[in-house]
Image (cartoon, rainbow, N blue to C red):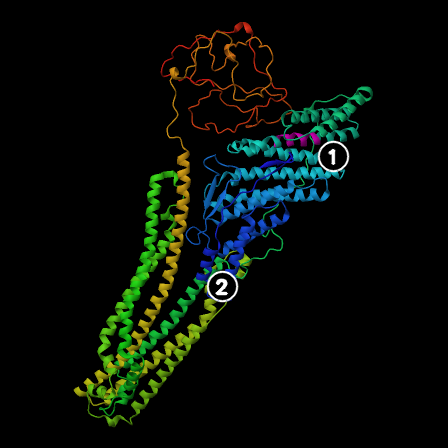
């Protein structure tokens, strides 16, 4: 930060390292969205976003509105894109690195910087740069023109609002300690400074517009108040005064506080004169003169007040002259004067994106992650509903087939001759052969273990990557302790491990299901093989029985055939109903988007259940009706079959034949079910492979990001360790560093940490000064007084006191610190920037004791070993 034109303060921009947005974002887009026009458009938008970041952060920016527009547009785009991508350490991991705007580090360590995998951190830093650039643009305005004044006020208020927004949001956005430049105390102070400068601009405009003095006085007094608040905030925050930037800013704030107060008094004095209060006029002008005198004496190198001082002094001279000769009004004390009012015309600009003009979201068509997640859960709920309805119907059909097979229907009705293969069995046999017979099932069974093994290997490899990185992280955390200040890998990987555990559980259940299918196949494979044989072999394998031709024209046979036809009709209706249920679609995306826009949040469960009930309620009723119809028909079939069986001639041959026919019918049903199960299992494993590959990519990406972060942190730690002193500071024995004996004579004047400017030496040396014990220099102890281990610090030189005004640390010439100097102490022990001494006007000189108290110099006796001796420089 620097004081522009020696009057207005602007803020330096932060610098960012380059980040490749294209690769990770494109990877997410291709993994999440199917190939098509939308995916192509999103990939193009990713490229545009990357270009926008380079334009906003990858080059020096001019102090112009067009540059600010680019920065704000990038900030708006970050806000728009944040809810549409899963930016986090354990999902879409992008690490952003930014340098501290104020802390430039040391000669060896480089600038202080922070790298975080947080989009909130990127947003915060971009907004900081927007505020900083706005302050620079404002300070470049021509304040002699009306347009320049308006622009400056606008940009200072924008900067104040942006810094204030960072103050309120930075801790929640980062979830860790920020760098000092974006810490709440720093940006809070900057926000106050910008607001004070905006108020000053309004004061300048009011002056330029020749508004009433009463109004101008209130504007100036409010500006003084704002500058005073900013000064206190800046001075009393323990970390700010150590920055060289704030050491430059403090005196500007102090001077502005006095100048605005002086302007307020000047314009209020004019008001007093108009009201014939000549004593008050003089009192206010005297106070204003004292204020500008304080500024001239202390802060002349930062702010020039010559014109204002001349104006005040001319008015004061004239007022005194008139009062002395004409009015003779009593001049009151400053403390008895009526307080000047205040009028705040400025307000920090509210930060509510979009901040840029005519902003359009690059990812306008992409739905937010909240909607995507709700859609994912809705899809699961929909799939469960469909599977439940379809599964219920399939179970009912299997139950029906099983009951008919146990009754040997319809084969028993077709087998009245007792020696030919029933037509229904022949149709079943042909159906099995057309589907590939035994070879088809055996091939599917052989493929399953291979698919299972592939999935297990992908899952094991993914979790192994996490294990290895977590082990390395734990080892480094043990080695560096608190210095290893990043999120533990164990905490970060919990969601991924939970996901991996879920996949392992799914695989274990799939293995059990595979075993059930295999056992069922083993049970029926013999009969399935028989159905695959030619008709002649099939006929020979089925026992023949005595003909039952007497039943061919009976009523019960006709009733059974009618009932079986009705059951077939029910099963066909189910097939159509299943197709209808699977074809149901509804655009829940629009529903979720409208709810999100209206309420700002989504109640996915309520919306989903309501829509599913609306979409599938009628189908559920039809499924239940189908089940009731089947149950009624099966009851009637069983009754009719009992009557049919009682009419049939029963013998052992007929029973054997019926048993074989039952097994063949059951084998066909099992073949169909086993084939469906195996095909579903194969599809399941193939689909799971794709999901596991995505999971593996996710693990690989986060491990790579963690490795990059780890390397950065290790590099930073190594630099910090290299800068640390290799051994603690120690005291040097007195005999090694005692000064050589000097000839008897005058003692040199004491040295101080502030060196006055070197001036030409006078031709003759003045009489040597000597010191009283109270003013003795640290290197010249009086007789019989032991040398202290560390002399007490000298009091700072007294200052000429002006109007009530808080003092502050770090101003050249007033820094308080001990006078003892130890060359063996740690490098840069006090962390104080070098500042040449400048004597302020009115400051007391060095104390000079009377010459008759001079003490002769003696060589110091060898002191005890435990008492340290600090050699004088």
Q: Is residue 725 magenta?
A: no
The answer to whether marks 2 and 1 mark residues whose Cβ atoms lie closer than 8 Å is: no
Q: Mark 1 sits on what residue?
A: 214
Q: Which residues are magenta?
A: 253-263
Q: Is residue 799 above or below residue 74?
A: above
Q: Is 255 within the magenta? A: yes
Q: Which quadrant of the view contains residue 556?
A: bottom left
Sequence-wise, which precedes: disc 2 or disc 1? 2
Report the number of numbered marks.
2
Where residue 870 appears, as percent x and y from the top left, is: 43, 18
Of residue 811 and residue 747, the one placed in the foreground of this image is 747
Note whether residue 485 is visible: no
Relative vertical location of residue 409 with respect to residue 764 in this rendering, above or below: below
| Relative to 265, 706 lies left or right | left
Along the line of sight, which residue is nearer the eye, 858 or 92? Answer: 858
Residue 8: where, in percent of width, then height?
Answer: 64, 36
Task: Give percent across and percent down for residue 448.
Answer: 29, 68
Label 2 and label 1: CA atoms lie apart by: 64 Å
Mark 1 burial class by Cα count in 10 Å: few <14, some 14-19, many 20+: some
The percent coordinates of residue 13 (x first, y second) are 56, 42
> Residue at image x 37%, y 46%?
488
Q: Which residue is mark 2?
A: 39
Picture layout, residue 16 above or below residue 508: above
Q: Quadrant of the N terminus?
A: top right
Task: Identify the element where label 2 is drawn.
Answer: helix
């Amino acid at each position: 930060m620097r004081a522009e034109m020696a009057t207005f303060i602007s803020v330096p921009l932060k610098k960012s390292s380059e980040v490749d947005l294209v690769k990770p974002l494109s990877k997410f887009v291709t993994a999440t969205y199917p190939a098509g026009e939308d995916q192509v458009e999103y990939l193009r938008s990713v490229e545009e976003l990357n270009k926008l970041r380079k334009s906003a952060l990858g080059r020096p920016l001019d102090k112009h509105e067009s540059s600010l527009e680019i920065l704000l547009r990038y900030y708006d785009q970050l806000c728009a894109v944040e809810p549409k991508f899963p930016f986090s350490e354990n999902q879409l991991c992008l690490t952003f690195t930014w340098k501290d705007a104020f802390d430039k580090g040391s000669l060896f360590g480089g600038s202080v910087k922070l790298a975080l995998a947080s989009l909130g951190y990127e947003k915060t830093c971009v907004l900081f740069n927007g505020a900083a650039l706005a302050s620079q643009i404002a300070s470049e305005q021509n304040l002699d023109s009306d347009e320049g004044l308006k622009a400056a006020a606008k940009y200072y208020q924008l900067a104040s609002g942006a810094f204030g927004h960072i103050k309120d949001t930075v801790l929640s956005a980062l979830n860790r300690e920020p760098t000092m430049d974006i810490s709440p105390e720093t940006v809070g102070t900057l926000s106050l400074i910008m607001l004070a400068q905006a108020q000053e601009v309004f004061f300048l405009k009011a002056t330029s517009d020749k508004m009433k003095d009463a109004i101008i006085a209130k504007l100036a007094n409010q500006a003084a108040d704002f500058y005073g608040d900013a000064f206190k905030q800046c001075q009393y925050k323990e970390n700010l005064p150590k920055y060289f930037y704030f050491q430059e800013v403090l005196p500007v704030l102090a001077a502005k506080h006095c100048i605005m107060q002086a302007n307020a008094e000047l314009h209020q004095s004019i008001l007093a004169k108009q009201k014939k209060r000549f004593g008050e006029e003089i009192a206010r002008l005297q106070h204003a003169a004292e204020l500008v005198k304080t500024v001239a004496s202390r802060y002349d190198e930062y702010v020039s007040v010559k014109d204002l001082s001349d104006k005040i002094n001319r008015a004061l001279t004239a007022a005194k002259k008139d009062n002395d000769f004409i009015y003779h009004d009593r001049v009151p004390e400053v403390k008895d004067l009526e307080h000047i009012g205040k009028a705040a015309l400025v307000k920090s600009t509210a930060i509510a994106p979009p901040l840029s003009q005519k902003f359009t979201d690059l990812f306008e068509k992409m739905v937010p992650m909240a909607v995507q997640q709700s859609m994912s859960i809705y899809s699961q709920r929909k799939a469960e509903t469909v599977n439940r309805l379809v599964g219920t119907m399939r179970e009912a059909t299997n139950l029906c087939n099983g009951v008919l097979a146990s009754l040997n229907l319809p084969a028993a009705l077709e087998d009245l001759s007792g020696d030919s293969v029933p037509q229904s069995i022949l149709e079943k046999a042909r159906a099995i052969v057309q589907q590939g017979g035994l070879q088809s099932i055996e091939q599917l069974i052989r493929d399953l273990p291979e698919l299972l093994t592939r999935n297990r290997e992908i899952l094991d490899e993914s979790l192994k990557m996490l294990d290895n990185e977590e082990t390395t992280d734990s080892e480094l955390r043990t080695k560096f302790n608190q210095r290893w200040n990043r999120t533990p890998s164990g905490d970060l990987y919990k969601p991924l491990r939970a996901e991996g555990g879920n996949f392992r559980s799914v695989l274990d259940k799939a293995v059990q299901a595979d075993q059930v299918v295999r056992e069922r196949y083993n049970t029926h494979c013999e009969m399935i093989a028989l159905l695959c044989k030619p008709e002649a072999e099939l006929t020979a394998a089925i026992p023949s029985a005595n003909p039952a031709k007497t039943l061919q024209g009976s009523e019960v046979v006709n009733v059974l055939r009618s009932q079986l036809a009705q059951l077939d009709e029910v099963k066909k209706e189910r097939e159509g109903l299943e197709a209808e249920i699977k074809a149901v679609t509804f655009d829940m995306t629009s529903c979720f988007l409208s709810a999100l826009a209206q309420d700002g949040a989504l109640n996915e469960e309520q919306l989903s259940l309501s829509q599913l009930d609306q979409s599938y309620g009628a189908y559920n009723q039809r499924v239940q009706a189908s089940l009731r119809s089947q149950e009624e028909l099966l009851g009637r079939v069983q009754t009719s079959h009992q009557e049919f069986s009682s009419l049939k001639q029963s013998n052992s041959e007929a029973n054997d034949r019926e048993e074989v026919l039952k097994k063949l019918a059951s084998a066909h049903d099992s073949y169909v079910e086993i084939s469906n199960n195996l095909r579903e299992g194969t599809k399941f494993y193939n689909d799971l492979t794709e999901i596991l590959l995505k999971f593996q990519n996710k693990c690989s990406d986060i491990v790579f990001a963690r490795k990059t972060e780890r390397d950065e942190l290790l590099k930073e730690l190594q630099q910090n360790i290299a800068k640390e002193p290799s051994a603690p500071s120690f005291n040097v024995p007195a005999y090694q560093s005692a000064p050589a004996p000097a000839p008897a004579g005058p003692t040199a004047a004491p040295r101080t940490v502030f060196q006055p400017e070197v001036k030409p030496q006078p031709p003759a040396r003045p009489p040597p000064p000597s010191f009283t014990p109270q003013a003795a220099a640290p290197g010249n102890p009086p007789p019989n007084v032991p040398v202290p281990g560390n002399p007490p610090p000298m009091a700072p030189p007294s200052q000429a006191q002006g109007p009530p005004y808080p003092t502050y640390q770090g101003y050249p010439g007033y820094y308080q610190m001990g006078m003892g100097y130890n060359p063996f102490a740690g490098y840069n022990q006090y962390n104080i920037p070098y500042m040449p001494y400048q004597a302020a006007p009115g400051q007391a000189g060095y104390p000079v004791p009377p010459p008759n108290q001079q003490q002769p110099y003696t060589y110091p006796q060898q002191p005890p070993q435990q008492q340290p001796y600090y050699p004088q420089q």
